[in-house]
Image (cartoon, grey):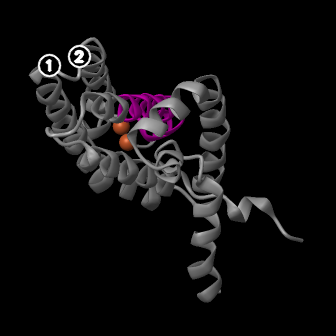
Amino acid sequence: MFSLNKLSPTITDMIRFDHSHVMVTFHQYTASQKPTVKKALAETICTALEIHATLEEEIFYPVMRELEGSDPTILKAEPEHNEMRRVIARLRTTKAADPQHDVLMHELMRDVMHHVADEETVLLPDAERLLPADRLTELGMAMTRRRLQLVTPQAGKIAANTAVGFSGSTAAMVLGVAGAAFAAFKLIPRKAHA
Ligand SMILES: [Fe+2]
Ligand SMILES: [Fe+2]
């Protein structure tokens, strides 16, 4: 019988997917843009990062702490999210026309790049080595369910920022709403190797 579970991306692929699309949004932010565009891009990035950090803290990090609780990468992961939240709070209270807005955006980008590098070279490979495929898929489904709960109350704000910032399809991917399309894409190589 056809199973919807098979359509669900693993938690590790979802995390990589979120990282890629936050980076795409960072790359759209340049110093020469109009303040309204800068603010919309900044807010899209901040919202996507907040949702991603909450999902990792609630669903991914507790599992990793059980597997390798004394690993320095998992120990510093949540404090790094909190540092990121402090930069986000300062960014939100800074006008986009203020030169400090660019400085804070670059600080956030640098922090996120370091953090993402640690996750993608340590935590995600460790999770894939230590957990069975079924468990990775099950955690991916839990992440999708929780993401919908977190995104729904913010849908209006997200749509408004998307209209000013960039194309709707990119924003949908930043927030992981396109997860089903991604899952379908991932099915192709799996079937080919079946
Ligand atoms: Fe993280
Ligand atoms: Fe992450």
Q: Which residue is mark 1?
A: 98
Q: Position of residue 137 (x, y in %)?
A: 62, 55
Left or right relative to 6: residue 93:
left
Q: Position of residue 150 (x, y in %)?
A: 59, 28
Q: Which mark is residue 95?
A: 2
Q: Quadrant of residue 40?
A: top left
Q: Residue at x 68, y 38 (%)?
A: 145
The residue range painted magenta reads 43-66
Left or right relative to 178: residue 85:
left
Residue type pointed to by label 1: Asp
Left or right relative to 17: residue 113:
left
Query: Is residue 52 rendered magenta in the image?
Result: yes
Identify whether 56 is placed above or below 120. above
Residue at the extreme top: 93
Residues at marks 1 and 2, CA–CA distance in whole angstroms: 5 Å
Query: Is residue 168 rendered magenta in the image?
Result: no
Residue closer to the observer: 134 or 109? 109
Residue closer to the observer: 129 or 102? 102
> Which type of secondary structure does the marked residue at label 1 adopt?
loop
Q: Residue at x 56, y 57 (%)?
A: 10
Report ligand 2 position as a quadrant. Answer: top left
Q: Which quadrant is home to the C terminus? A: bottom right
Mainly helix, strand or loop, the magenta region? helix
Residue type pointed to by label 2: Lys
Q: Residue at x 46, y 46 (%)?
A: 174
Q: Quadrant of residue 132?
A: bottom right
> Which type of secondary structure does the marked residue at label 2 adopt?
loop
Residue at the extreme right: 1
Asked if disc 1 and disc 2 are in contact, CB closer than 8 Å, the reply is yes
